[in-house]
Amino acid sequence: MGNCFDGGDHCLSMSNGGTAVFVDVLTLAVSDLASEPWHYRFASLIALQDQNLMGRGNVGFDLEDIDWGPSPQEQEAAKDFVLRVTDLALARHRWDELGYEPPYAPKYLETFRAMVEAYDPATPVGRLGRPFPAPEEAALASCVRHRVLTGLPFWDGCVFCNAEWTPPTAETLNSRT
């Protein structure tokens, strides 16, 4: 089982592990670049790709489901932001903080960048998948420990905190009694 990120005629299909890496590196980049309301909505969309909470194989989005804005200027600014986020991630921004080496991340990011570059944000919103986070669902909170935007108001932790959490097993539950 894997996940797919679609854009026009293109698809970036990744394993669950590849998706986790993709989300990690985009989270680091979007957290450091976000400065406007739409940026924080996009950051929330990235946070919603956290498989530790959404489930393995249950994430992904279609570029057609993103609300790029009503005017050509807003659409171009939004697209430019996504490209800048992707470029910052491609520059290995903060990858030293990951605790692992993501060898396939550049390939995923290059494919995603090409999808976004080729995508026309004037395409009508498809609403085929989950809706783009509304302004009140923007990722405005920051995880102090990891210095990244969190998925608030959806959940408390960031993608890195959630990766560290392990669900209790029958053994750990029984040992508490």
Image (cartoon, rainbow, N blue to C red):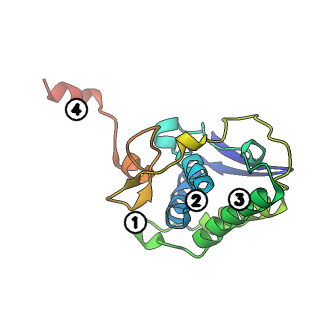
Nearest-to-viewer mark from 2 and 1: 2
Q: CA distance from mark 3 to mark 1?
A: 31 Å
Q: Nearer the viewer, residue 22 or 135?
A: 135
Residue 172, numbered label: 4
The residue lying at 34 percent from left, 35 percent from top is: 167
**Res. 74 image quadrant:** bottom right
Q: Which mark is residue 99?
A: 1
First in sequence: mark 2 or mark 3?
2
CA separation in Å, label 3 and label 4: 46 Å
Q: Position of residue 123 (x, y in %)?
A: 86, 47
Position of the N terminus, as image quadrant, is top right
Q: Alpha carbon of mark 2 to alpha carbon of mark 3: how far?
A: 10 Å
For label 2, the residue is 36
Bin the neighbour count of mark 2 within 10 Å (Cα to Cα): few under 14, some 14-19, many 20 and up. few
Q: Is residue 26 left or right of residue 153?
A: right
Depth check: 102 or 73 in front?
73
Q: Amino acid at mark 4?
A: Thr
Q: Residue at x 65, y 69 (%)?
A: 84
Q: Helix, strand, or loop for circle 4?
A: helix
- Residue denoted by label 3: 78
Q: Amino acid at mark 1?
A: Gly
| 62 relative to 71, above or below | above
Among the two numbered marks 3 and 4 on one chain, the one whose residue lies closer to the N terminus = 3
